Amino acid sequence: MDKILITNIQRFSVHDGPGIRTTIFLKGCSIRCPWCSNPENLTPYPQEYSLDGIDGVYGEWYETENLVLECLKDNVYYEGKYNNKKLWNIKKYEDIKNLPGGVTFSGGEPLLQMESLVTVCDLLHCQNIHIAAETSLFVPSDLLDIAIQNIDFFYVDIKIMEPKLCRNIEHGSIDLYKINFDKIMKSGVPVVVRIPVIGGFTDDKQNRFAVKQLIQQYRTSILKIELIKEHSLAIKKYKSLKMETSYRGVDDSLLEIYKFELKDIGIPIEICAV
Ligand code: SF4
Protein backbone atom coordinates (compact mmCIF):
# COMPACT_ATOMS: atom_id res chain seq x y z
CA MET A 1 0.00 0.00 0.00
CA ASP A 2 1.28 3.51 -0.86
CA LYS A 3 2.31 5.76 1.97
CA ILE A 4 2.67 9.54 2.14
CA LEU A 5 5.04 11.36 4.49
CA ILE A 6 3.34 14.39 6.05
CA THR A 7 4.08 16.79 8.90
CA ASN A 8 0.68 18.41 9.45
CA ILE A 9 -2.98 18.46 8.49
CA GLN A 10 -4.25 22.00 8.83
CA ARG A 11 -8.03 22.27 8.90
CA PHE A 12 -10.19 25.31 8.04
CA SER A 13 -7.50 26.99 5.91
CA VAL A 14 -8.82 30.01 4.02
CA HIS A 15 -5.70 31.04 2.06
CA ASP A 16 -4.96 27.80 0.21
CA GLY A 17 -7.53 27.70 -2.57
CA PRO A 18 -11.28 28.17 -3.08
CA GLY A 19 -13.42 28.14 0.07
CA ILE A 20 -12.45 26.39 3.29
CA ARG A 21 -9.64 23.88 2.74
CA THR A 22 -7.97 20.98 4.48
CA THR A 23 -4.28 21.65 3.85
CA ILE A 24 -1.91 18.70 4.00
CA PHE A 25 1.80 19.49 4.42
CA LEU A 26 3.95 16.89 2.71
CA LYS A 27 7.55 16.39 3.77
CA GLY A 28 10.48 16.64 1.35
CA CYS A 29 11.63 19.39 -1.01
CA SER A 30 14.10 19.33 -3.90
CA ILE A 31 15.46 22.83 -3.30
CA ARG A 32 16.56 24.87 -0.29
CA CYS A 33 15.22 28.42 -0.14
CA PRO A 34 17.08 30.11 2.74
CA TRP A 35 13.85 31.90 3.72
CA CYS A 36 11.70 28.73 3.81
CA SER A 37 8.87 29.10 6.32
CA ASN A 38 8.50 25.33 6.72
CA PRO A 39 12.04 24.03 7.42
CA GLU A 40 10.55 20.91 9.02
CA ASN A 41 9.32 19.91 5.54
CA LEU A 42 12.64 19.88 3.71
CA THR A 43 14.04 16.40 4.30
CA PRO A 44 12.16 13.39 2.85
CA TYR A 45 12.28 11.41 6.08
CA PRO A 46 11.01 11.83 9.68
CA GLN A 47 13.25 14.17 11.65
CA GLU A 48 13.76 14.59 15.39
CA TYR A 49 13.45 18.03 16.95
CA SER A 50 13.92 19.60 20.32
CA LEU A 51 12.43 22.88 21.49
CA ASP A 52 12.04 24.41 24.95
CA GLY A 53 12.62 21.03 26.61
CA ILE A 54 10.13 19.19 24.39
CA ASP A 55 11.39 16.48 22.02
CA GLY A 56 9.42 15.15 19.06
CA VAL A 57 9.52 14.02 15.45
CA TYR A 58 8.54 16.02 12.37
CA GLY A 59 6.89 13.69 9.86
CA GLU A 60 4.59 10.69 9.94
CA TRP A 61 3.88 8.13 7.22
CA TYR A 62 0.16 7.84 6.33
CA GLU A 63 -1.34 5.08 4.24
CA THR A 64 -3.21 6.73 1.37
CA GLU A 65 -6.63 5.47 2.51
CA ASN A 66 -6.04 6.80 6.04
CA LEU A 67 -5.07 10.19 4.68
CA VAL A 68 -8.31 10.32 2.69
CA LEU A 69 -10.27 9.41 5.84
CA GLU A 70 -8.57 12.33 7.64
CA CYS A 71 -9.71 14.67 4.84
CA LEU A 72 -13.25 13.31 4.92
CA LYS A 73 -13.57 14.43 8.56
CA ASP A 74 -13.96 17.92 7.03
CA ASN A 75 -16.48 16.77 4.44
CA VAL A 76 -19.16 19.00 5.88
CA TYR A 77 -17.26 21.99 4.46
CA TYR A 78 -17.22 20.71 0.90
CA GLU A 79 -19.85 17.99 0.73
CA GLY A 80 -22.05 17.89 -2.33
CA LYS A 81 -21.05 21.36 -3.48
CA TYR A 82 -18.98 20.28 -6.47
CA ASN A 83 -21.40 17.83 -8.06
CA ASN A 84 -21.38 20.01 -11.16
CA LYS A 85 -17.76 19.56 -12.15
CA LYS A 86 -18.14 22.16 -14.90
CA LEU A 87 -17.74 24.69 -12.06
CA TRP A 88 -14.16 23.48 -11.63
CA ASN A 89 -13.29 24.85 -15.04
CA ILE A 90 -12.39 28.30 -13.73
CA LYS A 91 -11.75 30.96 -16.35
CA LYS A 92 -11.20 34.06 -14.24
CA TYR A 93 -10.34 34.61 -10.60
CA GLU A 94 -13.83 35.86 -9.70
CA ASP A 95 -15.17 32.41 -10.65
CA ILE A 96 -13.61 30.81 -7.57
CA LYS A 97 -14.84 33.30 -5.02
CA ASN A 98 -18.19 31.69 -4.32
CA LEU A 99 -17.06 28.10 -4.60
CA PRO A 100 -16.78 25.95 -1.48
CA GLY A 101 -13.64 24.21 -0.29
CA GLY A 102 -11.62 21.06 -0.73
CA VAL A 103 -8.19 19.63 -0.09
CA THR A 104 -4.85 21.37 -0.76
CA PHE A 105 -1.46 19.67 -0.89
CA SER A 106 1.35 21.87 0.39
CA GLY A 107 4.82 21.29 1.74
CA GLY A 108 7.70 20.98 1.18
CA GLU A 109 7.16 20.11 -2.44
CA PRO A 110 4.03 17.92 -2.62
CA LEU A 111 4.56 16.91 -6.23
CA LEU A 112 7.62 14.85 -5.23
CA GLN A 113 5.17 12.31 -3.74
CA MET A 114 2.81 12.58 -6.72
CA GLU A 115 2.93 8.88 -7.61
CA SER A 116 1.47 8.00 -4.21
CA LEU A 117 -0.87 11.00 -4.24
CA VAL A 118 -2.66 9.69 -7.34
CA THR A 119 -4.59 7.22 -5.18
CA VAL A 120 -5.53 10.00 -2.76
CA CYS A 121 -6.71 12.17 -5.69
CA ASP A 122 -8.77 9.32 -7.13
CA LEU A 123 -10.51 8.64 -3.82
CA LEU A 124 -11.18 12.35 -3.19
CA HIS A 125 -12.49 12.89 -6.71
CA CYS A 126 -14.84 9.92 -6.23
CA GLN A 127 -16.35 12.04 -3.43
CA ASN A 128 -16.49 15.12 -5.71
CA ILE A 129 -13.86 16.87 -3.60
CA HIS A 130 -11.83 19.62 -5.29
CA ILE A 131 -8.02 19.32 -5.08
CA ALA A 132 -5.40 22.10 -5.15
CA ALA A 133 -1.61 22.01 -4.80
CA GLU A 134 1.17 24.49 -4.12
CA THR A 135 4.31 23.82 -6.11
CA SER A 136 7.77 25.32 -6.60
CA LEU A 137 7.95 23.52 -10.00
CA PHE A 138 11.44 22.24 -9.13
CA VAL A 139 10.32 18.66 -9.77
CA PRO A 140 10.96 16.09 -12.52
CA SER A 141 8.66 16.96 -15.43
CA ASP A 142 7.08 13.48 -15.49
CA LEU A 143 5.79 14.08 -11.94
CA LEU A 144 4.34 17.41 -13.06
CA ASP A 145 2.58 15.60 -15.92
CA ILE A 146 0.92 13.26 -13.41
CA ALA A 147 -0.04 16.23 -11.22
CA ILE A 148 -1.65 18.07 -14.14
CA GLN A 149 -3.80 15.00 -14.83
CA ASN A 150 -4.94 14.69 -11.20
CA ILE A 151 -5.06 18.15 -9.59
CA ASP A 152 -7.72 20.80 -10.26
CA PHE A 153 -5.97 24.03 -9.26
CA PHE A 154 -2.35 25.12 -8.72
CA TYR A 155 -0.44 27.75 -6.81
CA VAL A 156 2.88 28.21 -8.60
CA ASP A 157 5.85 30.00 -7.01
CA ILE A 158 8.11 32.42 -8.86
CA LYS A 159 11.28 33.16 -6.93
CA ILE A 160 14.83 33.83 -8.18
CA MET A 161 15.06 34.00 -11.98
CA GLU A 162 18.79 34.56 -12.56
CA PRO A 163 20.29 31.11 -13.31
CA LYS A 164 23.44 31.29 -11.16
CA LEU A 165 21.66 32.86 -8.20
CA CYS A 166 18.89 30.29 -8.50
CA ARG A 167 21.47 27.50 -8.38
CA ASN A 168 23.66 29.01 -5.67
CA ILE A 169 20.92 30.29 -3.37
CA GLU A 170 17.99 27.88 -3.93
CA HIS A 171 19.99 24.93 -5.26
CA GLY A 172 17.59 24.65 -8.18
CA SER A 173 17.84 24.59 -11.98
CA ILE A 174 16.11 27.53 -13.63
CA ASP A 175 16.08 25.57 -16.92
CA LEU A 176 13.96 22.82 -15.36
CA TYR A 177 11.77 25.47 -13.74
CA LYS A 178 11.12 27.20 -17.08
CA ILE A 179 10.29 23.92 -18.83
CA ASN A 180 7.79 23.13 -16.08
CA PHE A 181 6.38 26.66 -16.03
CA ASP A 182 5.67 26.44 -19.75
CA LYS A 183 4.07 23.02 -19.29
CA ILE A 184 1.73 24.06 -16.49
CA MET A 185 0.75 27.32 -18.19
CA LYS A 186 -0.23 25.46 -21.34
CA SER A 187 -2.10 22.72 -19.44
CA GLY A 188 -5.36 24.63 -19.04
CA VAL A 189 -5.48 23.90 -15.27
CA PRO A 190 -6.25 27.10 -13.30
CA VAL A 191 -3.08 28.72 -11.90
CA VAL A 192 -2.46 31.45 -9.31
CA VAL A 193 1.12 32.71 -9.20
CA ARG A 194 2.74 33.29 -5.80
CA ILE A 195 5.80 35.56 -5.51
CA PRO A 196 7.57 35.47 -2.15
CA VAL A 197 9.03 38.95 -1.63
CA ILE A 198 12.12 38.20 0.43
CA GLY A 199 14.51 40.89 1.63
CA GLY A 200 17.93 40.49 0.02
CA PHE A 201 16.92 37.52 -2.14
CA THR A 202 13.96 38.11 -4.48
CA ASP A 203 13.21 41.79 -4.02
CA ASP A 204 15.88 43.47 -6.18
CA LYS A 205 15.01 45.41 -9.31
CA GLN A 206 16.56 42.92 -11.75
CA ASN A 207 14.63 40.01 -10.31
CA ARG A 208 11.39 41.98 -10.25
CA PHE A 209 11.91 42.78 -13.94
CA ALA A 210 12.62 39.13 -14.85
CA VAL A 211 9.55 37.96 -12.90
CA LYS A 212 7.39 40.49 -14.72
CA GLN A 213 8.69 39.35 -18.11
CA LEU A 214 7.83 35.74 -17.31
CA ILE A 215 4.32 36.63 -16.16
CA GLN A 216 3.73 38.80 -19.22
CA GLN A 217 4.65 35.92 -21.49
CA TYR A 218 1.93 33.71 -19.96
CA ARG A 219 -0.51 36.37 -18.80
CA THR A 220 -3.60 34.75 -20.35
CA SER A 221 -3.02 31.56 -18.31
CA ILE A 222 -2.69 33.21 -14.89
CA LEU A 223 -5.80 33.91 -12.79
CA LYS A 224 -4.15 36.05 -10.15
CA ILE A 225 -0.77 37.19 -8.73
CA GLU A 226 -0.16 36.99 -4.99
CA LEU A 227 2.80 38.89 -3.53
CA ILE A 228 3.74 36.95 -0.41
CA LYS A 229 5.09 38.98 2.45
CA GLU A 230 7.99 37.43 4.35
CA HIS A 231 7.22 36.68 8.02
CA SER A 232 9.19 35.60 11.06
CA LEU A 233 6.86 32.84 12.29
CA ALA A 234 9.27 30.06 11.34
CA ILE A 235 12.12 31.25 13.57
CA LYS A 236 11.08 28.83 16.36
CA LYS A 237 11.00 25.92 13.92
CA TYR A 238 14.54 26.73 12.75
CA LYS A 239 15.58 26.78 16.40
CA SER A 240 13.96 23.39 17.04
CA LEU A 241 16.04 21.88 14.21
CA LYS A 242 19.21 23.74 15.18
CA MET A 243 19.22 25.44 11.77
CA GLU A 244 20.20 29.00 10.93
CA THR A 245 17.41 31.31 9.71
CA SER A 246 17.99 33.93 7.04
CA TYR A 247 15.06 36.11 8.10
CA ARG A 248 15.78 39.75 7.24
CA GLY A 249 12.31 41.20 6.83
CA VAL A 250 11.11 43.30 3.91
CA ASP A 251 9.97 46.89 3.74
CA ASP A 252 6.15 47.10 3.31
CA SER A 253 6.54 49.95 0.83
CA LEU A 254 8.50 47.63 -1.48
CA LEU A 255 5.48 45.32 -1.75
CA GLU A 256 3.41 48.30 -2.88
CA ILE A 257 6.08 49.26 -5.43
CA TYR A 258 6.20 45.67 -6.72
CA LYS A 259 2.39 45.65 -6.99
CA PHE A 260 2.47 48.91 -8.89
CA GLU A 261 5.13 47.59 -11.28
CA LEU A 262 3.02 44.52 -12.14
CA LYS A 263 -0.27 46.41 -12.42
CA ASP A 264 -0.13 47.07 -16.16
CA ILE A 265 -0.08 43.33 -16.95
CA GLY A 266 -3.80 43.38 -16.21
CA ILE A 267 -4.02 40.40 -13.82
CA PRO A 268 -5.59 40.83 -10.32
CA ILE A 269 -2.81 41.31 -7.72
CA GLU A 270 -3.01 40.92 -3.95
CA ILE A 271 -0.45 41.36 -1.17
CA CYS A 272 -0.80 38.36 1.16
CA ALA A 273 0.74 37.08 4.37
CA VAL A 274 0.38 33.29 4.23
S1 SF4 B 1 10.29 25.44 -2.34
FE1 SF4 B 1 9.00 25.95 -0.59
S2 SF4 B 1 9.25 24.24 0.82
FE2 SF4 B 1 10.94 24.12 -0.66
S3 SF4 B 1 12.62 25.19 0.32
FE3 SF4 B 1 11.56 26.67 -0.97
S4 SF4 B 1 10.07 27.65 0.38
FE4 SF4 B 1 10.74 25.77 1.42
Image (cartoon, grey):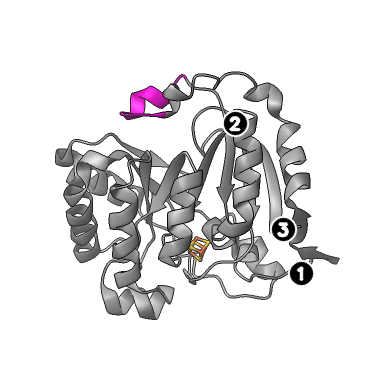
Whether residue 98 appears in this view of the structure is yes
Q: Which mark is residue 49?
A: 1
Q: Which residues are magenta?
A: 89-98
Badge 2 residue CB within 8 Å of ligand 1:
no
User: Position of 26 compared to 180: left or right?
Assistant: right
Q: Name the residue type under label 2.
A: Ile
User: Residue shown at 69%/72% (left/top)?
Assistant: 241
The secondary structure that most of the magenta stretch takes on is loop
Q: Which mark is residue 129?
A: 2
Q: Residue 152 or 247: which is nearer the viewer?
A: 152
Element at label 1: strand
Q: Residues within 10 Å of mark 2 (few under 14, many from 20)?
A: many
Dividing the picture into quadrants, the one containing residue 65 is: top right
Residue receiving disc 3: 2
Q: CA distance from mark 2 to mark 3?
A: 20 Å
Q: Residue 146 or 67: which is nearer the viewer?
A: 146
Q: CA distance from mark 1 to mark 2?
A: 34 Å
**Figure quadrant of the N terminus:** bottom right
Q: Position of residue 174 (x, y in %)?
A: 31, 70
Comes first in the chain, label 2 or label 3: 3
